Image (tube, rainbow, N blue to C red):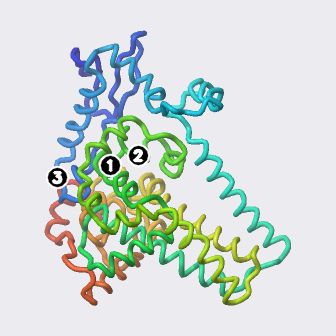
Amino acid sequence: MFTSRRHNCIHVPNSDIVYIRQRNNSLLEMAPAVTVTRVLATQKPIYDNYIIREHNINNILRDNCKNNDVAAHKVLDYYDEALPKNDPKFLAPLRKWEKRMGFVTPLRWINIIGVLLFHLITLLYLLYQFVMGEWPTWQSYLLESFLGGVSGFGVTAGAHRYWTHRSFKATTPLRIILMLCFSVSGQNQIFNWVRDHRVHHKMSETLADPHNAQRGFFFAHVGWFLMKKHPITVNEGNKLDMSDILDDPLVKFHSKYFNFFKITLCFILPTLTKIILWNETWKGAIGTTLIRYLLSVNFTWSVNSFAHLWGNRPYDRNIMPAESWKVSFVAMGEGWHNYHHTFPWDYKAAELSYFLNVTTMYIDLFAALGWAYDLKKASPSLIEAIVRKRGLKNR
């Protein structure tokens, strides 16, 4: 066991735990000393994960333990640090309850109510369909299946592989298509999506990870969306160089009219299309839109949860992200996650191009048209070299 007098912290060698000594002389688990996968999501990987791990642990200890037990006690006050200064007074009883229950950061009650109501209404609608037998037309299901693929392409090829990782370059027409497809998904603004995902790669499975799978399945899947970000997460996000996104005129345009694009393309237009073109009922039109949206967001969330907790790790056995064909099936190729966290700049996000990887197929199609170019990918020799060093021999 190693004790740092300067930081009043304890690190157990060959262990995944770092402790901080509190004022009452008890030990508080501070941060998991797990492998941090990459330095930047847009850079080629640094292969010595242990060096990166120690570097980030030292940064966390340095930032949070400078003043010995005073700073160590500050760890207990992360809740107050994350609490907005203009927090409504009517939430005060709930805030007291949250602190008493031991929540690390304040809950975002608007998001909690919204997610609960959305899932409840959609599930009740499905139950109503089965009980009453009032099914929407097949055209409505076909349209929403198509839009599910459109929104998935916007997330996987657009927000993820293009804007976050810069794994390929795109002409203006393709960039517009990616922006519109992403709007159909009804997710966050491109800037926020990219920033959070870059932090996720830089600080994977640490306190700074926005959806740290070390905190359990529920937190990694949706819990992170229902709570204020950890102050360490916010701090790491502020450190990132986001100039490429801030200087992107298309991203600026999308941010300016974000609510219009989201509400119109994700909800209003699909609903009205079904009513106008084939006389769908209002219940059927709205219900099928909600079903598509529910599946879409949960398929995206499954990459953060299922693909970080279950599966094999043939490319880097030292990290949590795993290979999951089931996640790849529902998330258009995003489930080959051990490969992706090992080579985040590879436009395929997988070693094999088309096996349960529809997104790669579409990118290659646009590349054939000349709309996508400078596609980055890991060479077979590089993959083999990394596997020999970090992976499984029987992959």
Asked if the residue at tag 1 contacts the one at tag 3, i.e. Cβ–Cβ closer than 8 Å, the answer is: no
In which quadrant of the rendered image does the C terminus lie? bottom left
Task: Judge by depth and name the residue closer to the eye, 6 or 289.
Answer: 289
Q: Is residue 392 visible?
A: no
**Label 3 to label 1: alpha-carbon separation:** 16 Å
| Residue type highlighted by circle 1 | Val
Circle 1 residue: 199
Q: In this view, does 138 lie to the left or right of 336?
A: right
- Residue on which disc 3 sits: 46
Q: Is mark 2 in CB contact (under 8 Å) with mark 1?
A: yes
**Which picture quadrant has residue 15?**
top left
Q: Is residue 218 above or below residue 127?
A: above
Question: In the image, residue 39 lies at what x, y percent?
Answer: 21, 49
For residue 17, which numbered disc appears in the image?
none
C-alpha separation, residue under disc 2 versus residue under disc 3: 22 Å
Residue type, label 2:
Pro
**Which numbered disc, 2 or 3, marks the residue closer to the eye?**
2
Q: Nearer the viewer, mark 3 or mark 1?
A: 1
Residue placed under numbered mark 2 in the picture: 210
Q: Is mark 3 on a helix, strand or loop?
A: loop
Residue 152 vertical position relative to residue 390 in the rendered view, above or below: below
